[in-house]
Image: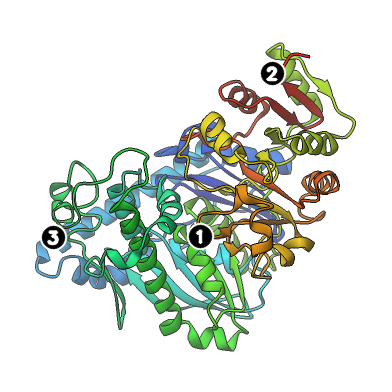
């Protein structure tokens, strides 16, 4: 069965994914084609078209469309939502119902418009999957777990912000507990992100990176987010407030500014903001671990400690470390495209399982476009760019890295999700002092205190890190062992942790070959790996994107398929 997942229900991070007979054949985010970060308000026309072209099929060959939005949960939960959101105003509650119904029609309209542009009849059979069930399916059904506890958490779906569930051996997902907006871990974190001077949806990982510099005990945020017997509670008078209550157009209230002081400005790390970041991270961790203990203890015990996890909050790798270290959890699968970019995939997997298909585990995120040597050569020739043809691209890249150079590495199919995993990467030598500062200042143009991630040959991970859990998608942080901190200092954060990608020949053959060649030259089975993009831009997709990025920053070398491009004159 050919199932096309279309994700444009959130009006940000639109994407498409294609399943054929239980296998994920292709998946991509629209931002990579439009070159607009998060592709706000766009429909995933180019992403869906790519999926069809990758599979070599025509639009009329699609059997089913899956869409990650459902009006059913709106009908089921609207009174519960109204009692929480508008406890003293029945008239506002009724108006909210009308607004939600209009939004539903708008979302269906977005789907139909996308299908028409792709060449698919909008009357095609369509599976409407709840937003958080799509997140849940993207994790559980692709984890390889026969059964597991499930957690999803993000800003909001239809009305749900957090879901605790159990994935059963027959493929069904059994809901155990839902938390409805305005109580939302994602919206709490995004609100604090804005207060700390970053953009919501772009800056949450910056708060996560800032947190280790502060002391959470110096700031009390319990009035804004607190655990309750029924889940947790956000103070919606201060967190993600309506327009008329916002401070300077942001999603936090004026009362927050009175209590915490003026919002942060600029890029510098300073008090009290580092402590506020630390307290924000600590609150997220404490509340999430509390949810696991209260609502997922028995499912975890029944299922051998296996937990499948997705949603935007699942991209918080510091929280993920706390989860994997929790005594209830033995295995944690985090969907690599955990944000709303992954719900097209989740809707498709949910629809496939509901129709009796067995899915293969997702072992690679390399699901996007690839480009042949002929296509790369044509792009280089188009712009009259000189190049060297390489007989062994991984070996040449390793030679440059061993010499202390930083390079762009463009190989194979583009990654699905936010992490560069050796397909569209900027690479550096973690043992050369100052390389991280160079990448931040001259190439990425981002804050100097932001950490970089290591890509590591998997068999050496137990020597380097204090946790032996697998990490194929950079979704965890681990402590770096003392004897390695000085050897790979450029990828060790201020708190002594790193967020590794563990590489094998099966997962990324060419990248694995590069790492082995680098290890042979330096004794280090580790390279710095960050996404091939500049601050505020999507990861590059095509050779043309890579060329534009290369000549718009301080990079000196680019290995793009079997070609070496350099700015230095012989």
Residues at marks 3 and 2 touching, judged by CB atoms closer than 8 Å: no
Callout 1 touching callout 3 (CB < 8 Å): no
Q: Earlier in the sequence, mark 2 or mark 1?
A: 1
Q: Is residue 57 visible?
A: no
Mark 2 lies on residue: 567
Label 2 neighbour load within 10 Å: few <14, some 14-19, many 20+: some
Q: Name the residue at 53% across, 59% down.
A: 347
The reply to whether callout 2 and callout 1 are in contact (CB within 8 Å) is: no
Q: Nearer the viewer, mark 2 or mark 1?
A: 1
Query: In the visual, does 58 lie left or right of 443?
Result: right
Badge 3 is on which residue?
Answer: 92
Q: Residue furthest top?
A: 384
Q: Which mark is residue 26?
A: none
- Viewer-nearest of discs 3 and 2: 2
Point out the frontmost of discs 1 and 3.
1
Q: Determine the CA span between mark 3 and mark 2.
A: 61 Å
Q: Please say if 138 is above or below 486.
A: below
**Of pointers 1 and 3, the one earlier in the residue sequence:** 3
Q: Position of residue 425 (x, y in %)?
A: 65, 40
x and y, in percent, of residue 204 in the image: 41, 51
Viewer-proximal residue among 493 and 538: 493
Query: Which residue is nearer to you in this view: 46 or 104?
Result: 46
How packed mark 3 is, by other alpha carbons closer than 10 Å (few <14, some 14-19, many 20 or more), is: some
Residue assigned mark 1: 495
Q: Is residue 379 above or below residue 249?
A: above
Percent across and percent down for residue 506 are: 81, 56
């Amino acid at each position: 069965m050919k199932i096309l997942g279309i994700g444009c229900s959130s009006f940000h991070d639109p994407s498409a994914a294609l399943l054929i007979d239980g296998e994920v054949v292709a998946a991509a985010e629209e931002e990579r084609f439009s070159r607009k970060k998060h592709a706000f308000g766009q429909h995933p026309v180019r992403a869906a078209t790519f999926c069809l072209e990758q599979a070599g099929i025509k639009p009329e060959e699609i059997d089913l469309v899956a869409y990650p939005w459902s009006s059913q949960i709106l009908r089921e939960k609207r009174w519960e939502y109204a009692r929480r959101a508008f406890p003293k105003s029945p008239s506002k509650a009724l108006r909210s119902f009308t607004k939600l119904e209009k939004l539903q029609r708008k979302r269906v309209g977005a789907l139909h418009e996308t299908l028409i542009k792709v060449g698919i009849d909008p009357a095609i059979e369509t599976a409407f999957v709840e937003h958080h069930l799509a997140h849940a399916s993207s994790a559980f059904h692709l984890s390889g777990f026969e059964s597991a506890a499930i957690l999803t958490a993000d800003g909001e779906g239809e009305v749900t912000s957090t879901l605790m569930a159990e994935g059963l051996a027959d493929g069904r997902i059994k809901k155990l507990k839902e938390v409805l907006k305005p109580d939302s871990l994602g919206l709490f974190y995004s609100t604090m992100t804005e207060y700390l001077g970053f953009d919501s949806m772009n800056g949450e990982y910056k708060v996560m990176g800032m947190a280790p510099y502060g002391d959470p005990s110096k700031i009390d945020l319990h009035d804004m987010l607190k655990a309750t017997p029924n889940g947790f509670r956000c103070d919606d008078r201060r967190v993600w407030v309506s327009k008329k209550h916002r401070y300077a157009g942001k999603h936090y209230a004026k009362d927050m500014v009175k209590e915490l002081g003026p919002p942060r400005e600029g890029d510098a790390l300073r008090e009290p903001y580092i402590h506020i970041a630390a307290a924000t991270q600590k609150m997220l961790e404490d509340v999430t671990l509390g949810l696991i203990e209260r609502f997922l203890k028995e499912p975890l015990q029944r299922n051998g400690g296996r937990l499948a996890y997705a949603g935007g909050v699942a991209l918080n790798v510091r929280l993920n470390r706390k989860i994997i270290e929790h005594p209830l959890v033995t295995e944690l699968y985090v969907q690599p495209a955990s944000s709303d970019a992954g719900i097209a995939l989740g809707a498709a997997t949910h629809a496939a399982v509901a129709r009796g298909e067995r899915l293969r585990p997702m072992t690679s995120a390399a699901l996007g476009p690839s480009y042949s040597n002929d296509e790369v050569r044509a792009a280089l020739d188009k712009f009259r760019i000189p190049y060297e043809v390489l007989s062994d691209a991984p070996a040449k890249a390793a030679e440059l890295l061993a010499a202390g150079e930083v390079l762009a590495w463009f190989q194979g199919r583009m990654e699905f999700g936010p992490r560069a995993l050796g397909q569209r990467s900027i690479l550096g030598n973690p043992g050369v002092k100052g390389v991280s500062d160079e990448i931040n200042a001259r190439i990425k143009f981002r804050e100097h205190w932001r950490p970089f991630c290591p890509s590591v040959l998997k068999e050496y991970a137990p020597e380097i890190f204090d946790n032996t859990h697998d990490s194929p998608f950079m979704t965890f942080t681990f402590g770096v062992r003392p004897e390695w901190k000085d050897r790979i200092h450029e990828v060790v954060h201020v708190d002594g942790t790193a967020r590794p990608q563990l590489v094998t020949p099966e997962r990324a053959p060419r990248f694995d070959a590069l790492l082995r060649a680098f290890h042979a030259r330096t004794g280090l089975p580790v390279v710095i790996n960050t996404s091939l993009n500049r601050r505020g831009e999507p990861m590059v997709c095509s050779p043309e994107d890579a060329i534009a990025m290369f000549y718009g920053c301080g990079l000196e070398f680019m290995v793009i398929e079997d070609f070496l491009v350099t700015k230095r004159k012989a």
